[in-house]
Image: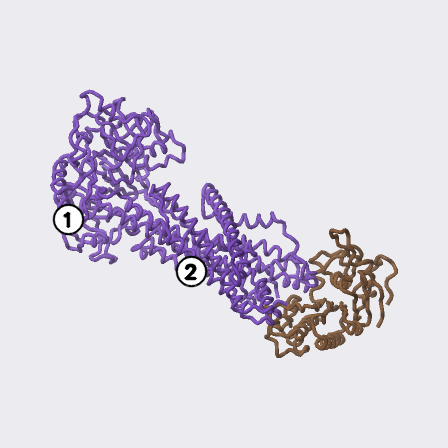
């Protein structure tokens, strides 16, 4: 796949844009103002991810990986440039419209799992299903908990689960709504090597069977190597776009 | 799933969270406090209005200190209106050696025109509706009179010179919710038998009650005709007005009690605000996650609003339930004996209490929740990202207006709101200042200490904001509790102690002119020391320099008691011993120089030392328009009514008007236990008026057996025992203070809620610290000792501050209001700090103890 030619999205129809990918970023920059002046976190990032693709965003700490992930998922707004997410121009949407776009169509996996401590494993999976208004929420949640091998731990709260088990619940939660895209931020960052490897296996297995687009941030070489494509960031700038 | 349902679902799952518990608890305490007073106030108000005309005993009533012979209304003469007459006066009732002051109501056969009087055969039985007029030769009495006279139904008692049989107990009468604060129990006797008692003397305080009932048109015509004919000492009361007056008086007292309750609610607001703030802090991640999953601002707002509303309703309902229980206890304290006659619980206070709870909750927690829904979704990736700030003015406006609305609601009028808010701000300011000073002192102690104590004190000093808040809240609660206890014990004890040895302990009132010599003889025969004997005439101050007195005063000063009631006017040439001239010249001085024109002085028949003090009871002509008539006015009255030397005052005495010029202003030592007067005339102006006399006498403890003999010898003279009066006042005090103490229980609980809320808010940081310390090798006992040191220090400091505040407040009250000598209370400085240390120590330890028990590894995982 080649990046679009012009600096602007073509003005044609959404369907034409769709063909370029489910996530498209053009001339994406993020700057913050600090006491020492303006600091560029991301500069002129160009990116297009097609449906079903897997992309690893790699780079050293502070290279802007997580910032890019946040921007692509519509969690933040860029200082410059444009993003198309699932056919919608994010710049045209306000915070609430972006939230509505995410509901049920985008899944997340986080480094620190981000399970709600008051809810059981099953309820944590149930939460996005309920938010998306799925009628079969309960059965789906139970199905996905079983898929990650934790059916026996349904009533356990995150505190009663190990790190690896918590991340498995998080994976089930991310895939339970049949999302079109799953964003994962350092999914193995808080886990030991063995557990991390098992989580990677599970992540790719689920992704393959659900035909989901997967965009993940990592500095785990093994994990990045499993992705079809890799985007390497150095100080906020794209250095390399390698194909697997 | 709707977000409302999701909110409830999440709430249910988080119900065990500490913040929700504290928030709920604080709300229950606050609402419990306001609904306790709300319920009881409502019951009493409804008792008054539901009784309507029966409350007054008639449709209309005219009260007058003199009999009214001619009614300017044909309806009365023609009999178109039903009428009834009663006479009310105070007198002694005696049986054997026992005697008691009572309020006698002499009634005719038609009394009451509306409502019923229930007479029972035994005390505290419901009784049956019967005419209030007892059979000839008998009386009905209030149950409280029986034990005072060691009498029961069927026994005979003496009133004046007549003997009556107690024929029944007054179980219920119009206008009475039970003889609550009555010092003189009520007795019903026949109007036609008053004469036989011979207790009525010229100058006796009498009230004639004329009752009327009839058709509305006739009553309206009657009112219109009678009103202009009444003078300022007479009053026309409609059944509605009667209730309204009572309700007005009650509403005022009720309002202050409600405001006391409101303080607990406001203290709860502090606890709620802390808990809500901490709850929001802990839920930023949850909110961010929900946004990440696609929740919009409106959906989050719905979710948190429904949670808040649910908690608000739950807390308020539980508070109302507690209020419903405690109001019964409060009723038993305020209205013993009448509780069963109050209407059942009303629904109106439930609404008020729930609305108060929701308003308090909204004011306390909206700023925190407003931040919660403004959490950026990016926080899921960058945990340090704070919510978008909410404009400070917006939070302040939301909280401020909610709280102000709440205060305004309870205080009623703008002046009281202003006063309350002002006092509250001043109090908070003083408490913050004191708490800060105490913490500075704590720093000194910390430097000298070591080990766990040093660690505990360091905690206290590090969380300066929390500590200030906890100290302030707890100091306030302890201070108010202590102040009440002191007021109760000190004032009464102080007053009793302050009486000089051999100060008069009995007042003799209603001494008829013809009895004076005999009374003197009796007392000297029994070697009793009496004060000067002062003749008394009752009159009302009506004008100043020819203008109606009310018109000379600003609007808010017109309601003075001095203007509404009749004053006891006396005359003497000798300045009473406990009086001092502050301005002008005592009229007696000039009189002394004056030639023989002066009224011939007659020896005081009651006092051996004061022979020359008394002017004759009669003799000189009445000089009602004598422009040279002179009076001396008490300084407080002169100040209240804006009177000065040279002012010409007009008094209405009976149907005459007497003018006199102020020639001196006196200070009066009111607690001297001597007969004291606001206005003293120079001899010569009032002498011709019918007057009875008053005196005080000292009866040594071993000579009290003289008194029954005295009462038997002079049945018409009222003997007031000061120790009984003081005991009565003490009992009334105990009732009121008991009621307020019940409310202070809520305040203390609210103070503890503040402590727990602040501790919970710091629990995460404390746990992190404890984990670190334990990992570094600190033993559990070390941590536990550190925690105990911190909380005990906090409680001790709060107790010390509260002791200091209570001593200062008590000194001010004793000195300014009651002119009692300064007294310190060493026990207070022991009890309050110990009590504070115990309460704060317990609540603090219970809140935080588990952080010393959790294994470090588990804590680290939990914190991650």
Q: Colour mode? A: by chain
Q: Is residue A219 left or right of residue B444?
A: right
Q: Which mark is residue B705?
A: 1
Q: Is residue B71 left or right of residue B600?
A: right
Of the 4 image quadrants, the one containing the N terminus of chain B is: bottom right
Q: Is residue B98 left or right of residue B378?
A: left
**Rendered residue at 45%/45% (across/down):** B412
Mark 2 packing: few (<14 Cα in 10 Å), some, or many (20+)?
some
Q: Colour of chain B?
A: purple
Of the 4 image quadrants, the one containing the C terminus of chain B is: bottom right
Circle 2/circle 1 CB separation < 8 Å: no
- Precedes in sequence: disc 2 or disc 1: 2
**Residue B294 percent across, percent down from the top left:** 68, 63
Q: Colour of chain A?
A: brown
Looking at the rendered image, the disc whose residue lies closer to the viewer, 2 or 1, is 1
Q: Residue B69 carries which label?
A: none
**Residue B278 percent across, percent down from the top left:** 57, 59
Q: What element carries label 1?
A: loop
Q: Name the residue under label 2.
A: B322
């Amino acid at each position: 796949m080649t990046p679009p030619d012009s600096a602007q999205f073509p003005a044609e129809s959404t369907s034409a844009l769709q063909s370029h990918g489910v996530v498209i970023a053009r001339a994406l920059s993020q700057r913050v103002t600090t006491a020492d002046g303006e600091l560029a976190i991301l500069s002129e990032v160009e990116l297009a991810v097609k449906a079903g693709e897997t992309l690893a965003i790699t780079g050293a700490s502070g290279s802007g990986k997580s910032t890019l992930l946040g921007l692509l998922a519509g969690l933040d707004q860029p200082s410059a440039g444009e993003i198309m997410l699932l056919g919608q121009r994010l710049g045209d949407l306000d915070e609430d419209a972006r939230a509505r776009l995410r509901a049920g169509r985008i899944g997340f996996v986080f480094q620190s799992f981000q399970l709600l401590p008051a809810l059981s494993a099953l309820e944590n999976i149930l939460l996005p299903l309920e938010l998306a208004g799925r009628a079969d929420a309960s059965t789906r949640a139970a199905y996905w908990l079983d898929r990650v091998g934790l059916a026996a731990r349904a009533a356990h709260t995150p505190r009663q689960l190990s790190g690896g088990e918590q991340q498995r619940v998080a994976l089930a939660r991310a895939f339970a709504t049949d999302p079109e895209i799953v964003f994962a931020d350092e999914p193995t960052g808080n886990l030991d090597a063995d557990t991390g490897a098992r989580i990677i296996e599970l992540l790719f297995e689920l992704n393959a069977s659900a035909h989901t687009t997967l965009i993940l941030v990592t500095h785990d070489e093994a994990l990045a190597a499993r992705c079809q494509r890799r985007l390497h960031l150095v100080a906020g700038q794209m250095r390399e776009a390698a194909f697997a | 799933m709707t977000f409302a349902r999701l909110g409830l679902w999440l709430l249910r799952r988080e119900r065990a969270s500490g913040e929700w518990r504290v928030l709920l608890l604080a709300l229950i305490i606050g609402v419990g406090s306001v609904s306790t007073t709300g319920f009881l106030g409502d019951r009493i108000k409804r008792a008054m209005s539901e009784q309507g005309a029966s409350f007054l005993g008639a449709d209309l009533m005219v009260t007058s200190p003199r009999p009214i012979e001619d009614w300017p209304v044909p309806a009365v003469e023609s009999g178109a209106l039903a009428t009834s007459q009663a006479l009310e006066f105070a007198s002694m009732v005696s049986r054997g050696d026992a005697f008691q002051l009572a309020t006698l109501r002499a009634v005719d056969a038609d009394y009451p025109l509306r409502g019923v009087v229930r007479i029972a055969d035994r005390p505290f039985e419901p009784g049956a509706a019967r005419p209030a007029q007892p059979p000839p030769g008998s009386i009905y009495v209030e149950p409280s009179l029986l034990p005072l006279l060691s009498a029961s139904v069927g026994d005979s008692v003496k009133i004046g010179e007549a003997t009556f049989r107690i024929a029944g107990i007054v179980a219920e009468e119009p206008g009475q919710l039970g003889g609550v604060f009555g010092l003189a129990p009520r007795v019903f006797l026949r109007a036609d038998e008053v004469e036989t008692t011979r207790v009525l003397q010229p100058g006796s305080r009498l009230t004639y009650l004329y009752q009327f009932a009839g058709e509305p048109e006739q009553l309206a015509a009657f009112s219109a005709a009678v009103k202009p004919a009444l003078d300022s000492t007479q009053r026309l009361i409609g059944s509605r007005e009667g209730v309204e007056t009572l309700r007005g008086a009650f509403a005022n007292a009720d309002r202050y009690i409600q405001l006391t309750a409101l303080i607990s609610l406001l203290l709860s607001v502090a606890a709620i605000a802390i808990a809500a703030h901490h709850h929001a802090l802990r839920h930023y991640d949850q909110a961010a996650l929900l946004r990440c999953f696609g929740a919009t601002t409106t959906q989050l707002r719905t979710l948190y609003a429904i949670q808040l509303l649910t908690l608000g309703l739950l807390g308020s309902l539980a508070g109302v339930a507690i209020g419903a229980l405690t109001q019964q206890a409060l009723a038993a304290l305020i209205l013993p004996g009448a509780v069963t006659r109050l209407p059942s619980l009303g629904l109106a206070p439930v609404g008020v209490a729930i609305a108060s709870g929701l308003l308090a909750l909204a004011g306390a927690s909206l700023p925190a929740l407003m931040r919660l829904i403004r959490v950026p979704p990016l926080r899921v990736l960058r945990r340090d990202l704070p919510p978008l700030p909410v404009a400070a003015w917006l939070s302040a406006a939301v909280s401020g207006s909610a709280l102000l609305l709440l205060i305004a609601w309870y205080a009623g009028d703008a002046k009281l709101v202003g006063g309350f808010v002002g006092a509250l701000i001043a109090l908070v300011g003083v408490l913050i200042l004191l708490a800060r000073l105490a913490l500075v002192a704590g720093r000194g102690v910390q430097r000298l200490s070591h080990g766990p104590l040093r660690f505990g004190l360091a905690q206290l000093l590090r969380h300066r904001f929390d500590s200030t808040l906890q100290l302030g809240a707890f100091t306030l609660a302890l201070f108010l509790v202590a102040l009440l206890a002191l007021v109760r014990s000190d004032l009464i004890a102080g007053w009793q102690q302050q009486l000089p040895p051999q100060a008069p302990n009995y007042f003799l009132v209603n001494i008829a002119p013809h009895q004076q010599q005999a009374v003197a003889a009796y007392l000297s025969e029994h070697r009793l020391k009496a004060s000067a004997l002062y003749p008394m005439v009752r009159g009302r101050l009506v004008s100043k320099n020819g203008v109606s007195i009310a018109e000379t005063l600003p609007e808010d000063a017109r309601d003075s008691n001095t203007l509404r009631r009749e004053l006891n006017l006396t005359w003497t040439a000798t300045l009473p011993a406990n009086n001092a001239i502050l301005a002008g010249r005592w009229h007696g001085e000039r009189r002394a120089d004056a030639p023989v024109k002066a009224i011939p002085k007659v020896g005081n028949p009651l006092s051996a030392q004061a022979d020359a003090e008394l002017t004759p009871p009669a003799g000189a002509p009445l000089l009602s328009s004598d422009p040279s008539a002179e009076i001396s006015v008490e300084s407080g009255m002169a100040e209240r009514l804006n009177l000065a030397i040279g002012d010409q005052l007009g008094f209405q005495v009976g149907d005459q008007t007497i003018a006199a010029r102020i020639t001196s202003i006196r200070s009066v030592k009111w607690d001297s236990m001597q007969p004291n007067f606001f206005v003293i005339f120079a001899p010569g102006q009032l002498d011709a008026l019918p007057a009875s006399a008053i005196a005080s006498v000292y009866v040594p403890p071993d000579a009290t057996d003289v008194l029954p003999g005295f009462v038997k010898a002079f049945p018409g003279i009222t003997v007031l025992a000061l120790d009984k009066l003081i005991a009565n006042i003490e009992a009334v005090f105990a009732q009121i203070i008991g009621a307020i103490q019940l409310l202070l229980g809520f305040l203390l609980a609210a103070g503890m809620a503040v402590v727990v809320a602040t501790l919970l808010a710091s629990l995460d940081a404390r746990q992190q610290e404890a984990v670190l310390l334990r990992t570094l090798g600190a033993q559990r006992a070390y941590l536990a000792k550190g925690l105990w040191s911190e909380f005990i220090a906090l409680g001790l400091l709060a107790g010390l501050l509260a002791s200091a505040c209570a001593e200062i407040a008590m000194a001010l009250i004793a000195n300014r209001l009651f002119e009692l000598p300064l007294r310190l209370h060493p026990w207070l400085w022991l009890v309050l700090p110990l009590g504070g240390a115990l309460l704060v120590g317990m609540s603090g330890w219970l809140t935080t103890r588990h952080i010393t028990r959790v294994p470090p590894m588990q804590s680290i995982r939990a914190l991650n």
